[in-house]
Image (spheres, rainbow, N blue to C red):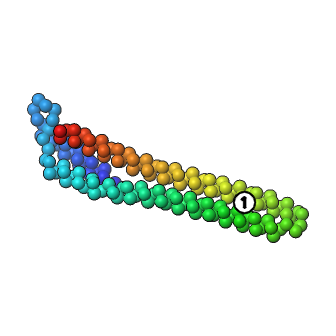
């Protein structure tokens, strides 16, 4: 991500600043730091857009999984209705329908869990980046004060 490289540039600018004797502080090029911070501000919306996209994609995948599960259930019910005439055939149809329904529910559950984990991991990464960025900005503001 570009934000990380911008944060590294910010860190380098601070580390390479001229030390002020007896104070533990340093002098840095204000315009350089402000330019880097401005670049970070410009890049953050892209990361937020990506997180929103992941969330919407997760919802879409969940909806598709639910629709697929519903279609599988409807197909199973239709097959059951067509085989009701004979006892042996209907018994097999009920068994097969149960297997199909259970598999559909299992597949839907797995898809839901997978998309939730994926979305959570992406959002977690974005959250970490944003928290790191915020910490660096707060530290820089504290030093500037």
Q: Is residue 104 left or right of residue 95?
A: left
In the image, what residue occupies the spot 38% across and 45% down?
Answer: 128
**Residue 44 in which image quadrant:** bottom left
The percent position of residue 54, horizontal first and vertical second, equals 45, 57
Left or right position of 96 against 13: right
Q: Which residue in the protein does label 1 denote?
A: 100
- The outermost residue toward the top is 22
Identify the image quadrant of the C terminus.
top left
In the depicted structure, whether residue 94 falls above or below residue 25: below
Residue drawn at (15%, 35%), measured in percent from left and top?
25
Q: Which of 31 and 142 is in front in this view?
A: 142
Label 1 crowding class (10 Å Cα cut-off): few <14, some 14-19, many 20+?
some
**Quarter that holds the N terminus:** bottom left
Residue 75 position, x and y percent, is 72, 67
Which residue is at the far bottom?
82
Left or right? Give the position of 99 relative to 92: left
* Element type where label 1 sits in the image: helix
Q: Farthest left residue?
A: 21
> Residue at left 43%, top 47%?
124
Residue furthest right as drawn: 87
Q: Nearer the viewer, residue 60 or 10?
A: 60
Residue that appears at 18% across and 49% down: 33
- Residue 104: image location, x then y, percent: 67, 58
Depth order, front residue of 44/18: 44
């Amino acid at each position: 991500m570009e934000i990380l490289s911008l944060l590294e540039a910010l860190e380098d600018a601070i580390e390479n600043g001229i030390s002020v004797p007896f104070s533990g502080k340093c002098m840095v090029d204000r315009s350089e730091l402000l330019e880097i911070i401005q670049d970070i501000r410009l890049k953050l919306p892209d990361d937020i857009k990506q997180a929103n996209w992941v969330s919407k994609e997760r919802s879409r995948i969940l909806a598709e999984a639910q629709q697929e599960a519903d279609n599988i259930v409807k197909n199973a019910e239709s097959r059951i209705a067509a085989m009701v005439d004979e006892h042996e055939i209907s018994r097999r149809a009920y068994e097969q329908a149960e297997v199909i329904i259970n598999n559909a529910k299992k597949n839907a559950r797995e898809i839901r869990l997978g998309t939730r984990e994926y979305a959570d991991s992406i959002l977690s990464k974005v959250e970490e980046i944003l928290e790191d960025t915020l910490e660096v900005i707060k530290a820089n503001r504290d030093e500037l004060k």
